[in-house]
Amino acid sequence: MKQKKNLIAALALGMTSFAYADVTLYGRIHMDLESTKAGTTETPSLSKVQNDASRIGFKGSEDLGNGLKAIWQVESGVSVDAGGGTWASRESFLGLSDATFGTLKAGNFLVPYDDLHYIAGNNFQQGTGISNDAAMWANGGDLKTGGFDTRLGNSISYQTPKYKGFSSRIQYSLTTDATNGKEAKSNGASVVSANVLYDDGPLRVGYGFQNNRDMQGLSSNFYEDGTAHMLAAGYVFGDFYLGGLYEHIKLENINNSGNDRSRNYYGAMASYTAGLNVFSAQFGKAASWTGAAGVADSGARMGSIAYNRILSKTTQVYALYTLMHNDDNAGYVLGSNAVQPGAGAVMSKQHSIAIGMWKNF
């Protein structure tokens, strides 16, 4: 009898392992050597080996029948330059997916506003790193300072199926109230983000919208509500790709004054592929904040040029140069989130040279 029980247990264990044999291990290791300088000629350069959003993840699905699947993913950031990382700190979720009805998931993931970044973003550095145009586009990724390009936990998202090139996604997130830690709309901030995308053949066109709501507690009363609208488009002309975007951001009730401020951003990028060589350039301009709570001379400009060498389908090396120029009262920072305009702590001119490599697996 004991041998029979052991045999049944062994068979059950084997069946469990077989049922989850479709689990996929994946990730990316991305590092570069950077030399960054800000300010006057007397300011020393900062050189470092930089980890650029390296990650490792596990994902899988289970066929539930009639076209329905259970899907899951756990993705963690890893600091391969110095060690460390946080479990499930990146795209992590549990959900249901159906080819006819779409995908519903809950967890921690980037907002739909970010989904459109690939149309006109810094693809030559995988949308991360010192050349990341999200330093100005979307006003960065920190909700506390009015940013919109962010990853949010406590989120629910619905993604439509793709139909003749069209798709859409909407996400609702309950963020944690900085005052009492409760995760409820009545007690803390919340975010609604959505997009509509057409991507078929050589043409890509996307519209993104996001509303950051009830942000007083989270932002230490810097602003109450924030709204962002973005229109992006890109087109493939043989070996050339051209992309561009326009964005309008509005922040309301600045510092409990009852006054608002708004800002426009314009961006463009181009790339040319010659065999295994890719040459790219990108430029973005953030206008000054205007309105009753506007800040004069708070605009900035940022540009990058890059060369990528394709070593395989999953491996590339690159070299790039990035320059940012802040107006007198601007607060944008290369490779980071902006500070509040007028803070006076950011150097007007920042530039960086980077040589890097990424490997997907």
Image (cartoon, helix red, strand yellow):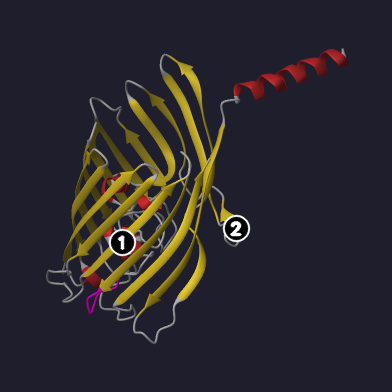
Quadrant in which the N terminus appears: top right
Viewer-nearest residue: 352 or 130: 352
Rendering coords of residue 47 (x, y %) = 49, 72
Cα distance in 3D space between marks 1 and 2:
30 Å
Q: Residue furthest left?
A: 291
Rendering coords of residue 148 (x, y %) = 30, 55
Prevailing secondary structure class for the magenta stretch in the rendered image: loop
Rendering coords of residue 160 (x, y %) = 29, 30
Q: Residue 36 occupies which quadrant of the picture?
A: bottom left
Q: Left or right: 24 with respect to 241?
A: right
Viewer-nearest residue: 136 or 50: 50
Q: Residue 112 occupies which quadrant of the picture?
A: top left
For disc 1, the marked residue is 304
Q: Does the CB distance between marks 1 and 2 fall below 8 Å? A: no
Q: Left or right: 76 with respect to 188?
A: right
* Residue type pointed to by label 1: Ser
Tell me, for residue 70, which label it has, or none.
Answer: none
Label 1: how many Cα within 10 Å (few below 14, some 14–19, many 20+) = many
For disc 2, the marked residue is 84
Above/below status of 156 relative to 306 = above
Labels 1 and 2: the sequence-earlier one: 2
* Residue type pointed to by label 2: Gly
Residue occupying image coordinates x 47% and y 57% = 356
Read off the magenta span.
Answer: 326-331
328 inside magenta stretch? yes
Viewer-nearest residue: 249 or 155: 249
Above/below status of 223 relative to 99 = below
